[in-house]
Amino acid sequence: EPSRFLEGKHVLVTCGATREHLDPVRFLSNPSTGKMGLAMAAAARSCGARVTLLHAGSVDTGGVDATITRHAFSSTDELFRQVKAHADADIVIMTAAVSDFRPAQKHEHKVSKDSAELSITLERTPDILQWLGENRKKGQILIGFAMETRDLVPRSREKRIRKKADWIVGNDLTMDGSGFAVDTNNVVLVGEHMEKSLSGSKKSVARQLLQQIFESQVTG
Ligand code: C5P
């Protein structure tokens, strides 16, 4: 029986890939399956938290516990609206793989392939984690994720500071058994005063992350 150290806490978890449509049948996205986020939600629930899960429509939520409240999103804007509606959570875990760019123009009808070339102008999406960091409820714990193919630790440190998050969980995409669509993970947890490598199944890593974060919040 796991200890219920998150009893009385509201935990918001986001997971899966956003989709940014160019037209009704084409979109920009990424390979995230949402597994790490589902594991974080399940771990938080088993530690006694009330959990709200914002998941991409493409995420398989078949195994999600019925006591976890779920809302589906598609675009970054939609996710942003849902996050704002739950921004009073005690702990926010941003595992969602949010697109950094989106087509500047969304066509109402399918774009035809009559031309030999097509240029698409992309614009930046809003950074939801950074918005949370800048509009943070007092005492809220903010956890972001970072996927990198190089300089994992320095980039995670930089991200933690820039986005005003408490913790960044860095994920090295080049390591075996890490990243998208696998059941295991090797991560580095980067906080203000401590950094720690964790590995195992995504389920076990999720549990270890919550434990570590909780312990260092308690001991300061
Ligand atoms: O900047 P980068 O995408 O590497 O940061 C990853 C972290 O920031 C993740 O926690 C992700 O959910 C969050 N993010 C966000 N809004 C964006 C891009 C990333 O909240 N537009």
Image (cartoon, grey):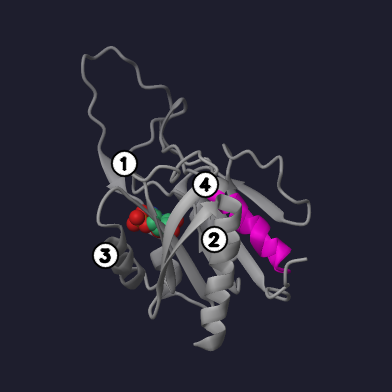
Rendered view: 146 above or below 26: below
Q: Nearer the viewer, residue 27 or 114?
A: 27
Q: Which marked residue is nearer to the observer: mark 2 or mark 1?
A: 2
Q: Which marked residue is nearer to the observer: mark 2 or mark 3?
A: 3
Q: Which residues are magenta?
A: 36-53
Rounded to the nearest whole Å, what is the CA distance between mark 1 and mark 4?
Answer: 36 Å
Query: Label 4, on which residue?
Result: 184
Q: Which marked residue is nearer to the observer: mark 4 or mark 3?
A: 4
Secondary structure state at the residue bearing disc 1: loop
Residue 94 is labelled as none
Label 2 beta carbon less than 8 Å to ligand 1? yes
| Amino acid at dot 1 | Ala
Rounded to the nearest whole Å, what is the CA distance between mark 3 and mark 1?
Answer: 31 Å
Rounded to the nearest whole Å, what is the CA distance between mark 2 and mark 4?
Answer: 27 Å
Label 3 beta carbon less than 8 Å to ligand 1? no
Residue 104 is labelled as 1
Q: Quadrant of ligand 1?
A: bottom left
State which tag comes first along the sequence, 3 or 1: 1
Query: Label 3, on which residue?
Result: 154
Query: What residue is shown at x 44% (from left), y 53% (from top)?
Result: 186
Residue 83 is labelled as 2
State which tag comes first along the sequence, 1 or 4: 1
Secondary structure state at the residue bearing disc 4: strand
| Amino acid at dot 4 | Thr
Residue 87 in view in this figure: no
Residue 98 in view in this figure: yes
Query: What residue is shown at x 67% (from left), y 42% (from top)?
Result: 61
For disc 3, the neighbor class at 10 Å (few under 14, some 14 to 19, many from 20) is: few
Q: Which marked residue is nearer to the observer: mark 1 or mark 4?
A: 4
Rounded to the nearest whole Å, what is the CA distance between mark 2 and mark 1?
Answer: 22 Å
Rendered view: 179 above or below 208: above
| Amino acid at dot 2 | Val
